Image: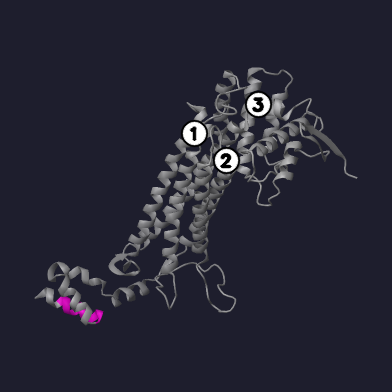
């Protein structure tokens, strides 16, 4: 028979497994939000634990308690950040209460992990209390958004690096095919000639802009409201704590964080996350356009455009032998669509904040971190499983070019638009080309 422990709050009692690392508030969240959707993202959990460690180190430095409690809390945070208690973080990503359930979950796991370090049993909160000690001088409303900023900055840096590598992959193709001519296309119709290198170079330029946007947006996220507690007015947080905890957090994260000049603003307004999401959407737009271009240029290979050959990744049909689909670009496009959908959700959630707090911050966090992860992974896969291995079919490019009347633009200056148009209309491309060339030489 499993042994249990009883925990109590103002709502009553809850039976928990004796060695459960979470407590009553987490148990109530499990009962209240049984969505079966997904758990709170671990990058956010780890960022919250890092905030709690900064607070513990601050209180140890300020000498708030002389019994080593805050040193034990800091050590518990290290154990959690090492992945020792991942299974104890069980709250749903989407929850009522502006993220309070997740903050409670973090407080309880840290407290119980610290108790274990001290040789105590989970639930002995007279020694270390989840709220009085772990959450001292804090609120969900300053811890949660601060952690979200840290998690977002970390993943933005990873995404920026992934975009740089994808950009470089396209630049290699630009150089490799700088003398390979092909048809340009506008509105899916033949346009003037260009090189395949110029096509790939344009993709690289678009990704370069995305990298710059991602780099610059980090500045917006470095300002945090930690120390502002419930609504940004710093209730229950001492002045010494507010200054010291930001410094501790800077050292722990290696990020140039700064205390908000007006914490009430950052506590109630989430427009910065909307701005970040908008730039992720811009990247998604570019990725979708590029992926679809490659998909179309790869089409065929005999009945379509067939100008490039993408790496064959898997069989493409259960009924048509030999069919190979452009699965990587298709995956990238679907990820881009999901990022665009997340952006809409973030905008709606941010707009629905009322007065001093936004109750829908869990949705903002879930969508933002999901978009970042989708982009990081899809960009990496796009680079390594598609772009690096693509080849230009130079014979096919040459055939399309020779069969097209796109060359006519070169004769307009000498012969006029109407004359060139008439000759192209009345003759096959090869014959029109000879006629126009002869007319220019007269």
> Is 432 inside the magenta-drawn segment?
yes
Q: Is 336 drawn above or below residue 416 in the view shown?
A: above
Residue closest to the far right: 1
Location of residue 176 in the rendering, given as x and y in whole percent from the top left corner: 37, 61
266 lies left or right of 137: left
Residue at 63 percent of width and 18 percent of height = 62
First in sequence, mark 2 or 3: give its number.
Answer: 3
The residue beneath circle 3 is: 56
The residue beneath circle 1 is: 222
Location of residue 235 in the rendering, given as x and y in whole percent from the top left corner: 60, 22
What is the magenta range? Answer: 428-437
* Secondary structure, magenta segment, majority class: helix
Looking at the rendered structure, which numbered label has been put on residue 361? Answer: 2
> In whole angstroms, how far apart are the C-alphas of marks 1 and 2?
18 Å
Location of residue 69 in the rendering, given as x and y in whole percent from the top left corner: 72, 24
Which class describes the residues within 10 Å of circle 3: few (<14), some (14-19), or many (20+)?
Answer: many
> In whole angstroms, how far apart are the C-alphas of marks 2 and 3?
25 Å
Asked if residue 399 shows in the view, the reply is yes
Give SS at disc 2: helix
Q: Is 385 drawn above or below residue 162 in the view shown?
A: below
Residue at 42 percent of width and 48 percent of height = 210
> In whole angstroms, how far apart are the C-alphas of marks 1 and 3?
21 Å
Residue 410 lies in quadrant = bottom left
246 lies left or right of 178: right
Residue closest to the far left: 442
First in sequence, mark 1 or 3: give its number.
Answer: 3
Which class describes the residues within 10 Å of circle 2: few (<14), some (14-19), or many (20+)?
Answer: many
């Amino acid at each position: 028979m499993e042994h249990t422990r009883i925990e109590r709050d103002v709502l009553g009692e809850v039976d928990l497994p004796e060695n459960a690392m979470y407590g009553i508030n987490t148990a109530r969240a499990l009962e209240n939000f049984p969505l079966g959707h997904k758990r709170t993202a671990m990058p956010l959990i780890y960022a919250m634990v890092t905030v709690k460690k900064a607070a513990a180190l601050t209180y140890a430095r300020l000498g708030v308690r002389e019994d080593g409690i805050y040193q034990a809390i800091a050590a518990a945070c290290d154990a959690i950040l090492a992945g020792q208690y991942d299974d104890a973080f069980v709250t749903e990503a989407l929850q009522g209460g502006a993220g309070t359930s997740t903050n409670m979950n973090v407080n309880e796991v840290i407290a119980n992990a610290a108790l274990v370090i001290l040789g105590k049993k989970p639930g002995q909160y007279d020694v270390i209390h989840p709220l009085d000690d772990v959450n001292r001088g804090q609120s969900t409303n300053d811890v949660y958004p601060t952690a979200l900023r840290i998690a977002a900055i970390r993943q933005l840096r990873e995404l920026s690096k992934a975009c740089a590598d994808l950009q470089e992959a396209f630049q290699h193709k630009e150089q490799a095919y700088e003398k390979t001519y092909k048809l340009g296309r506008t509105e899916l119709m033949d346009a003037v000639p260009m090189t395949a290198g110029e096509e790939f170079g344009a993709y690289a330029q678009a990704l370069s802009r995305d990298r710059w946007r991602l780099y610059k947006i980090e500045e917006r996220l470095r300002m945090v409201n930690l120390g502002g507690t419930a609504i940004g007015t710093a209730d229950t947080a001492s002045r010494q704590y507010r200054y010291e905890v930001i410094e501790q957090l800077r050292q722990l994260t290696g990020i140039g964080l700064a205390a908000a000049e007006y914490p009430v603003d950052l506590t109630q307004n989430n427009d910065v996350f909307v701005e970040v999401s908008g730039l992720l959407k811009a990247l998604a737009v570019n990725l979708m356009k590029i992926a679809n271009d490659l998909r179309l240029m790869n089409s065929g290979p005999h009945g379509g455009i067939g100008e490039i050959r993408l790496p064959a990744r898997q069989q493409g049909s259960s009924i048509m032998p030999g069919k190979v689909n452009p699965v990587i670009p298709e995956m990238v496009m679907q990820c881009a669509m999901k990022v665009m959908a997340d952006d809409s959700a973030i905008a709606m959630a941010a707009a629905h904040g009322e007065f001093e707090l936004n109750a829908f911050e869990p949705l903002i966090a879930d969508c933002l971190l999901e978009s970042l992860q989708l982009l990081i992974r899809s960009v990496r896969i796009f680079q390594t499983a598609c772009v690096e291995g693509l080849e230009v079919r130079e014979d096919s490019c040459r055939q399309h070019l020779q069969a097209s009347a796109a060359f006519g633009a070169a004769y307009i200056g000498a012969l006029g638009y109407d004359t060139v148009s008439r000759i192209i209309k009345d003759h096959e491309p090869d014959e029109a080309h000879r006629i126009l060339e002869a007319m220019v030489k007269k």
